[in-house]
Amino acid sequence: MLMQSRAKARGFKPIFLMTPSSPASGLILIVDDTPANLHVLSDSLGAQGYDVAIATSGERALKQIGRNPPDLILLDIMMPQMDGFEVCQRLKNSTETAKIPVIFMTALNDVQSKVRCFALGGVDYITKPFQEQEVLARIHTHLKLSRLTRHLEAEVAQQVVSLEEARQLAESANLAKTHFLANTSHELRTPLGIMLGVTNNFQEGIYGEVSERQEKALKMLENQGLQLLNIINDILDVSRLELAQLRLSFAPTAIATLCQDCLTSLRPQAEQKQLTLSLNLTETIPLLQLDETRVRQILMNLLSNAVKFTPAGGQVSLTVTSQNRGDDQRWLCFKVQDTGIGIAPDHIPQLFQPFYQVDSSLSRQYEGTGLGLTLIKRLTELHGGQVSVSSELGQGSTFTILLPYNKSVSPPDAQTVD
Ligand code: ADP
């Protein structure tokens, strides 16, 4: 029953003055089986500007709340049939009514009853006989808190929606970028391949004799073309890894031969810088199921970084071991160690992000795209492995790759998408 309070109708002088900026508003439901209590309270609430509804039993209260949910409930505990505890429990069990603040009003004054009220989800507890001013002050405070909470919840919900929209937008933009990179780098490879082929034909004298000067120019063309091809291939690989289009092609792989090949390829560069390049491989490692091309790519990237970032006269080594790491899995461990410039600790966390370079200035000393370590990490993880780095500025770096040690017993189970 919604009751326009008699006090309001009579222009009763408010007992508790609200601040002028926040006139009392809202629907208060009083649940009490003692009519005298209901009248006194509804008069004072009405005088404040509240709408007041009353219910004289728990059952009636629940029905009324279902029809017209109030902003706050003043709930007596001791009522015949359904007591205030049960009413509160039912309200809190329903998502529609759980958030309505409930203030218990009772003659029960023991600690257990008070604690039970709060445990059931009540926001406050007033003992009878009550002081009107105190009741009004508490109602005012709890209404304010409940409105503030609802307002904050709505704002948070809105923020969550906005964040989700922004995330989806960023994700689709990123996907579009990845597709663009994959498509353009694929298209760039064909003309570049032809240009390198023609350069090669010139070098081999297919189009006529080549002078020494022309040979030098052709060598330069070839070097720059190959460098560009490497960059395009890295971009294509990173894009395909992002699009989950790159699959490994497992085959029995001879580790020692693979490592020696990598070192042989890098020896000219190392010698140019008077670097000592060494392989430490004392164990006999059986043929392992790996994607040889991709493991070669991992090692070549790590070793060429080590050579690039180590000043003349330094040392670069590749150490290969197999190890148990406290789990059932045996691991193949590659360690690429250098005595180079090292990496400051604050750069380490971003190191494997695409395009990240410690020195990203245009005037940087070392060439590169910042894609090598991204590829190393993703290719390692695609093998079910892990990559880690330890480094000291000015002293050198160690990159460690762990790959599952799967002996070659089964045939290849996946194909490389090219
Ligand atoms: P790139 O070498 O093409 O710049 P990478 O992804 O391979 O890209 O490496 C990212 C950055 O990590 C490098 O630019 C360099 O700053 C740092 N880095 C990688 N390896 C080493 C190393 N062995 N010693 C010092 N810095 C390194």
Image (cartoon, grey):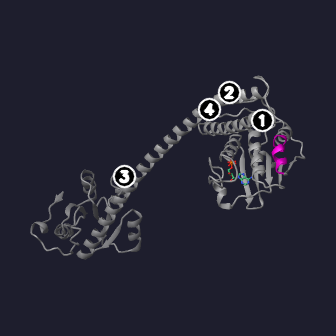
Q: CA distance from mark 4 to mark 3?
A: 59 Å
Give the foreground label among 4 and 3.
4
Viewer-closest of 87 and 206: 206
Q: Which residue is mark 2?
A: 194
Q: CA distance from mark 1 to mark 4?
A: 29 Å
- Mark 4–mark 2 contact, CB under 8 Å? no
Can you see residue 321?
A: no
Disc 3 residue lies near ligand 1 with CB under 8 A: no
Q: Is residue 264 above or below residue 390?
A: above
Which comes sooner in the sequence, label 4 or label 2? Answer: 4
| Image quadrant occupied by the C terminus | top right
Q: Position of residue 79 (x, y in %)?
A: 28, 63
- Dominant secondary structure of the magenta stretch? helix
Query: Residue at (38%, 70%) from the top-left corner?
Result: 114
Quadrant assignment, res 413: top right
Cα distance between the residues tagged 2 and 3: 69 Å
Membership of 344 in magenta stretch: no
Q: Please name whichever residue, 3 or 143, is drawn nearer the observer in this view of the structure.
A: 143
Location of residue 371 by image quarter? top right
Callout 4: helix, strand or loop? helix
Question: What residue is disc 1 on?
Answer: 213
